[in-house]
Amino acid sequence: MGTLNVAILGSAAGGGVPQWNCRCPVCSLYWAGDGRVSARTQSSIALSADGERWLLINASPDLRQQILNNPVLQPRNGSRDSPIAAVALTNADVDHIAGLLVLRERQAFTVYATAKNHQILADNSIFNVLAADIVERSTMVMDEMFDTGLGLHIRPFTVPGKVALFMEQGNDVRIGDVSETTIGIEISAHGKRLVYIPGCAEISEKVRQIASGADLLLYDGTTFTDDEMPQLGLSQKTARRMGHTPITGSGGSLNAFDGLSIRQRAYIHINNTNPILIEGSDEHETIVAAGWTVTHDGMMFLL
Amino acid sequence: MGTLNVAILGSAAGGGVPQWNCRCPVCSLYWAGDGRVSARTQSSIALSADGERWLLINASPDLRQQILNNPVLQPRNGSRDSPIAAVALTNADVDHIAGLLVLRERQAFTVYATAKNHQILADNSIFNVLAADIVERSTMVMDEMFDTGLGLHIRPFTVPGKVALFMEQGNDVRIGDVSETTIGIEISAHGKRLVYIPGCAEISEKVRQIASGADLLLYDGTTFTDDEMPQLGLSQKTARRMGHTPITGSGGSLNAFDGLSIRQRAYIHINNTNPILIEGSDEHETIVAAGWTVTHDGMMFLL
């Protein structure tokens, strides 16, 4: 009986921890060298059913650094080689697609995305660095499970979300739209099941049903409170305006999955402003007490 | 009398050292933990006339990591801040523009590029993450010196080159075209002068004239020999086909600047296959004996 290997390549939301231009309380601790805050790269995970061939979910701008930090993703044979066999995208935000530019240099692999998100890649000629003759672009159909040929089965599903920031047109942005813009992904191997939802604007009954029975739920941990960014004076946008459920408060994720049978649950895609990133903080203790883990780069789950 | 500060953020060519999918002799030494090969991020430099405000030349995909490694580029005041005041581009290759995506999050700065390269940014909507209302896109006119307002004067100049890889149309690529696709940049402050040429297909008399009298020349060190990639079986492309002068052989850069008054000369934009990256190699000794330095990440020149 094999294991479903889940490597946390990056655990932070867009910008990473610290964010290049930020001096919020969490980033300021990092810049000051305070050991309670660890550096985190932008969210991405790698999965394998055999320990040899890996599927990435999302390709973060930090992917080159993540490969250098994770020996399982480094080339092993011949003159050009990679254990990275495929990349599946949950949306087309910069923090989830820019890493595709790292995967240039004529290496074969498959990109799985929704038709909408493939169109965004097609509309941006910079992604032509992925040679069309060897990099396959495969369209995922919602709610249909498919076999990746890697011993991993994938089932994509829509979640309430919003369009990528760079595709927003003015302030007329619908939040909570269920479209193929933002999705979650369920991965199965060896009878084990991971549910990966790095961005979700609302925990609908459908989201709860899919999470139910998972061996591991990796969920959107962007902010602790809905008004975290406005309170810090960093942005006028609430978590919901950015397409994310806050951890606490009305509709928060902290207790939204209670009562379901979920073996392990952990937050990922954590924004640099989120106080759960400070080891020993009240907020960190709160989520641990509620049964959640805070992911960090380099963490490995063996399911 | 102040100094012109030049920080080498990244010294490698596209892909960096090691390259994610490569097991050429240099990358293999790195993967094996051999101390003679140091990791290098993709080429970019930062310049300052006052030690406070910095101009980047090119924005590499590794820019987030480069900022974390270089305290002079980290935020100092208020809640959002950056010492990075401007970015000038020498071409629109992925290894020189992808880092612009790192500089999102509503921070004001200026992007200097040729009209052609601005058009490539405009045609790729992903760069809309740079908010149009605060990120100024300024067009550089060839051979005209201008004042950045940072105590740094810039003069861009065309060099023989080629279009960005992702803009190539089939095999019909003209090499050595002098257009505004690939440029060099001359920067002056405090009576000192840096000439920065990370990509150049041929050392023309114009290139030699501009380099003459420089306090520092940072020049295209992509490959040691013209047929380095084909010899290793990694690609059919010679250095010249990629738009670069090799270091040795006919038309090579090693002795092309001899006889000119240049205070310091160093290679940058060094491809992972280049044996000068192996400390103590014959090739490394050869270029040092000829008066060149191999740049490495974290190096600082005070002119």
Image (tube, coloured by chain):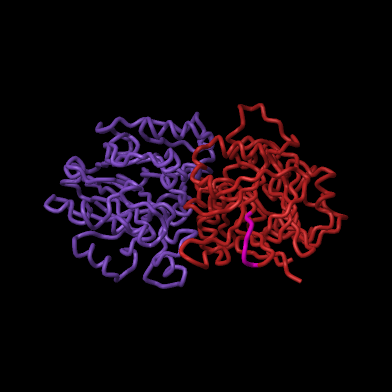
Chain colours: A purple, B red
Residue B53 belongs to the span the image colors magenta: yes
Apparent side of residue B184 relative to residue A262 in the rendered image (left or right): right
Residue B182 belongs to the span the image colors magenta: no
Q: Quadrant of residue A288?
A: bottom left
> Percent x, y for residue B227?
69, 40
Apparent side of residue B130 relative to residue B150 in the rendered image (left or right): left
User: Which is nearer the eye, B191 or A67?
Assistant: B191
Q: Point out the residue furthest to the right here.
A: B259
Determine the residue positioned at 26% across, 37% down. Answer: A157
> Percent x, y for residue A295?
31, 58
Q: Point out the residue furthest to the left here.
A: A259
> Percent x, y for residue B171?
64, 27
Q: In this view, does A212 lie above or below A135?
A: below
Q: In this view, does A233 lie above or below A133?
A: below
Q: Give the range drawn in magenta.
A: B51-56
Determine the residue positioned at 35% across, 37% down. Answer: A181
Apparent side of residue B32 relative to residue B193 in the rendered image (left or right): left
Q: In this view, does A115 lie above or below A102?
A: above
Determine the residue positioned at 67% across, 48% down. Answer: B222
Can see residue B303? Answer: yes
Apparent side of residue A19 relative to residue A153 in the rendered image (left or right): right
